[in-house]
């Protein structure tokens, strides 16, 4: 069962990159995205967003109480094989809803996002992220995608998205704090073409930091921008 899921995730990541590469304005991006492509991309996310198994977790057990199923440990983002894939699956649906709010898949997408973005689920995510031995959890790739998801929600005037953004904000704040604590300790860039690679995550983090902040994160935005400027100059100025 793993192979089909991995194929799905490879296609899924390509879908996200394609949509991110579109024009920065919603109208032009929507015009550039054929409806059949949008439906196909949405289908990728909807297929796995709450599909719990198979599941790949990196988990340090502090006690027997930590040996629980994914939907209990990370109750908002437990599908799509792993945490970061589920996070950018949520981003993909939010982005598509912003571009095509009346698309045939819109009602199902809203229902699935509403299922994820509850105060109880996000509180569970915050508890897990701040648990013992998890300072490096999904750092930087998954946490950077979490910030990009928050940015997408904050950018919309849609009432559902504004509500979801407010619900997600405690986790957004913790993800930004974890990354801001890590950046000054990073002594060299990670250049391998895998999830640990720093340049791609820096781009996602920069997008978030330079966007309109949420009510609880304005200081974190400013701090992140300065840290990213410093790190980019240290690591990439002479490339």
Image (cartoon, helix red, strand yellow):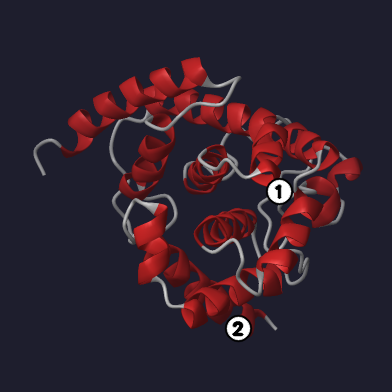
- Farthest residue toward the left? 238
Q: Position of residue 208 (x, y in %)?
A: 44, 36
What SS does tag 1 mark? loop
Q: Position of residue 227 (x, y in %)?
A: 34, 23
The answer to whether residue 83 is visible is yes
Q: Residue at x 57, y 40 (%)?
A: 157
How many marks overall?
A: 2
Q: Where is residue 128 in the image (x, y as percent from the top left)?
A: 75, 37
What SS does tag 2 mark? helix
In the rendered image, the quadrant that contains the N terminus is bottom right
Q: Residue at x 68, y 28 (%)?
A: 170
Q: Mark 1 points at which residue?
A: 59
Nearer to us in this view, 158 or 120? 158
The answer to whether residue 55 is visible is no
Q: Which residue is drawn at 90% across and 44% down?
A: 64
In the rendered image, the quadrant that contains the C terminus is top left
Using residue 100 as the reference point, say whether residue 5 is left or right of it. right
Using residue 79 as the reference point, say whether residue 196 is left or right of it. left
Occupied quadrant, residue 211: top left
- Farthest residue toward the right? 65
Disc with the residue nearer the chain's start (2 vs 1)? 2
Task: Give the Cα distance between marks 2 and 1.
Answer: 22 Å
Occupied quadrant, residue 47: bottom right
Q: Are discs 2 and 1 less than 8 Å apart at CB?
A: no
Nearer to us in this view, 223 or 73? 223
The residue mark sitting in front, 2 or 1, is: 2
**Is residue 169 shown above or below 142?**
above
Occupied quadrant, residue 126: top right
Nearer to us in this view, 206 or 32? 32
Q: Name the residue under label 2.
A: 3
Q: Residue at x 76, y 64 (%)?
A: 50
């Amino acid at each position: 069962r793993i192979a089909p899921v991995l194929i799905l995730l490879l296609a899924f990541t390509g879908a996200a990159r394609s949509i991110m590469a579109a024009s920065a304005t919603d109208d032009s991006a929507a015009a550039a995205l054929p409806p059949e492509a949008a439906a196909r991309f949405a289908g990728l996310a909807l297929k796995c967003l709450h599909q719990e198994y198979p599941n790949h977790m990196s988990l340090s057990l502090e006690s027997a109480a930590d040996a629980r199923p994914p939907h209990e440990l990370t109750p908002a983002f437990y599908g799509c094989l792993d945490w970061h894939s589920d996070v950018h699956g949520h981003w993909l649906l939010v982005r598509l809803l912003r571009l095509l709010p009346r698309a045939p898949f819109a009602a199902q997408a809203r229902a699935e996002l509403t299922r994820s973005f509850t105060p109880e689920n996000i509180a569970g995510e915050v508890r897990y992220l701040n648990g013992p031995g998890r300072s490096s959890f999904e750092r930087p790739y998954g946490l950077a995608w979490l910030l990009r998801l928050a940015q997408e929600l904050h950018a919309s005037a849609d009432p559902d998205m504004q509500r979801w953004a407010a619900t997600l904000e405690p986790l957004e704040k913790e993800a930004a704090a974890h990354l801001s604590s890590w950046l000054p300790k990073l002594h060299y860039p990670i250049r391998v073409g895998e999830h640990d690679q720093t340049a791609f995550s820096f781009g996602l983090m920069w997008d978030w930091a330079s966007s309109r902040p949420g009510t609880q994160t304005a200081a974190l935005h400013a701090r992140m921008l300065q840290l990213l400027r410093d790190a980019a100059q240290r690591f990439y100025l002479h490339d």
